[in-house]
Image (cartoon, rainbow, N blue to C red):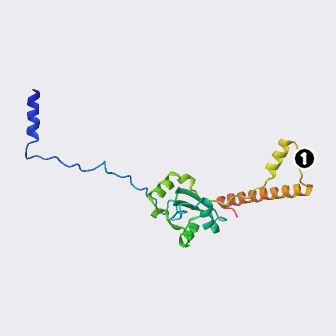
Amino acid sequence: PAAASADGDSRLMGKGSSLQEPRFNYYGAEAAAPDLSDDELPHVIEIYDFPPDFRTEDLLRVFCSYQKKGFDIKWVDDTHALGIFSSPVAARDALSTKHLMVKTRPLSQGTRAAKAKARAYADFLQPAKERPETSAALARRLVIGALGVRSNQTRAQREAERKKLQEARERKRLENKQREDAWEGRE
């Protein structure tokens, strides 16, 4: 019986038959590049073609005019980085500016690695915001309390600091009230 089946198989694969080529070749498949439209992360651009020995400080120096408005850098590799701006307008402005040491392009035209990095870190690539104004008053009070030493601040300095904090609280309360009034339709 085993010999009969072997003869049957040879009849099926006779001289006139041929193997059918597969319709899809999965072995040679490459992963598709992530599709990042300009609408998805319009405030992010790719910075490329700069010397491999550049550091973060060097790139920050190139884009120093955007730092006050908010600008951050995420590295892709030695010669590619993502520039995160505070708004799409600032990103378009940076794209239109010519720099001597770096080149820029929209993320949608970027390399596969830059797009993959942007996709992976999309939650962290939110528009860069200016750091809020801070005061060392709380830190100073905690350190002085922990060490048990007397403060070397004069009474006038403490009062000025207290007044500044009170003004900041009042300004924040007013901004929240204005935002709430705008949502409620009040004037």
Residue 160 location (% of width, % of height) = 86, 58
Q: Is residue 56 left or right of residue 108?
A: right
Looking at this view, is 172 or 27 the one in front? 27
Q: Is residue 103 left or right of residue 23?
A: right
The residue under label 1 is which amino acid type?
Answer: Arg
Looking at this view, is 186 or 126 the one in front? 126
In the picture as drawn, the residue positioned furthest to the right comes out as 155
* SS state under label 1: loop
Location of the N terminus (image quadrant): top left
Residue 41 location (% of width, % of height) = 52, 60
Looking at this view, is 39 or 144 the one in front? 144
Q: Is residue 92 left or right of residue 144?
A: left
Task: Note whether 56 is above or below 15 in the view shown.
Answer: below
Residue 39 location (% of width, % of height) = 49, 62
Location of the C terminus (image quadrant): bottom right
Q: Is residue 28 left or right of residue 101?
A: left
Quadrant of the image occupied by residue 166: bottom right
Quadrant of the image occupied by residue 181: bottom right
Residue, disc 1: 150
